[in-house]
Image (cartoon, rainbow, N blue to C red):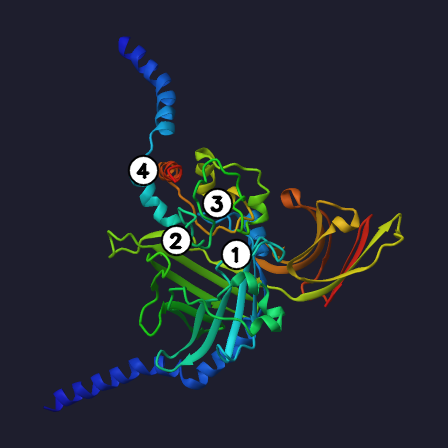
Amino acid sequence: MRLKLTKIISLLWLVFFSQTPALASNSNPELQAVLRDLMTWWPGEYDTLAQVKIEQQQGAPPDGPHDRQYRVFARVNVPHIGENVIYGEVHSVNKDGPLIKGQQVLYIVSIDNEQQAVVVRGRRIKDGALHEQAHLYPEKLHTLELDSAYGGNCDFRFRRYGRDLRGWLANAGQAGTVCTMQSKVTGQTMTWDADWAITPSEIWVFDNGYLQNPAQPEKLGRLFAGREDRVAERLYKGRPFTCSIRGIADGKELKNSAVRTVVLHDRGGELNLGDFGSAGHKLRLLRLPQPAPAPEYWADVLTLSVVADVQDKTMMESRATPWARTVKLNTDTLQARCKI
Amino acid sequence: MKTILLASILVMVQPVFGQSVSNTQCNLAVGEEVFALCSACHTRSTAEPAREGPSLFGVIGRKAGSVSGYKFSPALSGSGWTWDENMLNQFLKNPRQALPGTTMTFIGLKSETERRAVACYMGTF
């Protein structure tokens, strides 16, 4: 009898201790801290140029090199939609590149005590073309609406994993780590397998979409968006530098050459130099992780360079320490100075 | 000797024969099945409202990036391409590598059989 009681007590302790860590690591105060950090770290300008360059130098993953993308995330004041809301849009290539349709999204962030997670509901906006760069135009925010034709009801569930905040996609209110949705337009069933990691300086995006074959509903379907090798896209967060550029000739400032001032982020911010007599060239500010001073230690290097559009060839370059607040470049035709 | 001769003739003839088959034979069933991937973003007619991508009605023979009312990426509209089955075959293998700067997020089709079939199927509308 005594032995049986001891066994029952041991079992109860085992059950208690096996559940305690999960509860403790996602308590409401901790989720409040996750929400605070998410809303602080996430907003910003991001570029994947560093990933593209590293893959060019060190080798590409199995599915081939990543494409360059620019993404911006900004906290927006849209009380008609939610309290903690981030607007995001994606451009192909760089900041001036074309907007990718269907990727203008409002991320509605809240604490879900039942799921013990900070839930991020990404919802496509209605009339995306009318709301490009909505975060820069308060008048556009009033008319922001979620797209009712969007069939997704997926949530990212973010929790803290060491330093990082990590979120897996799941059907709203359900367990699991994938989200299945039916398109309201085509009726097709798609499954999204996605996981994002957010740090103060980078976002890693893994986002695979599968289209279900109606004849085989038990299977995931065919990959139509994302990557088979499941290598995450690395978005590097840029710091905004104010850059002044002036045209020169023979070491002297050109007559009628106004100083051009632009804001460039340091993860691949670019300015076309056509106005400075250098058509086909651009000025680029880039903080790039490099195997320096020794291959086993990587460190960022900040460069300001003139790059030819053809083959992205660097023509002139000046370097600075990664956290330098000023970087300058003088060429035969221009003087550029960027400072933060 | 006769066998070697016959084999040599077959080796010489096969590529030509194979090419003529792939250019003329159209597997519409496979093409239609593969097109399900495209139809998440593209319609086959102009009667339906446009989705994320432009309508593919009449795409074969059309200048790339020329559908009125649709905002194409500068990369596509400036490509100078005209869509035919061979061009579609090349593009659909890996759209973002074939045309850096495209805004099409489709991952591509590794199978040439599928690419040929879907390109051929697109010629039917």
Q: Quadrant of residue B77?
A: top right
Q: CA distance from mark 2 to mark 4?
A: 19 Å
Marks 4 and 3 belong to one chain = yes
Q: CA distance from mark 2 to mark 3?
A: 16 Å
* Picture layout, residue B90 above or below residue A290: above
* Picture layout, residue B86 above or below residue A256: above
In the image: residue A101, left or right of residue B24? right
Q: Where is mark 4, residue-wise?
A: B28
Marks 2 and 3 belong to one chain = yes
Q: Where is mark 2, residue-wise?
A: B40
Q: Where is mark 1, residue-wise?
A: A100
Position of the N terminus of chain A by quadrant: bottom left
Q: CA distance from mark 1 to mark 3?
A: 14 Å
Viewer-nearest of labels 4 and 3?
A: 4
Amino acid marked by disc 2 = Ala
Q: Where is mark 3, residue-wise?
A: B95
Q: Position of residue B108 (x, y in %)?
A: 42, 46
Subunit of mark 1?
A
Subunit of mark 3?
B
Subunit of mark 2?
B
**Mark 4: secondary structure:** helix
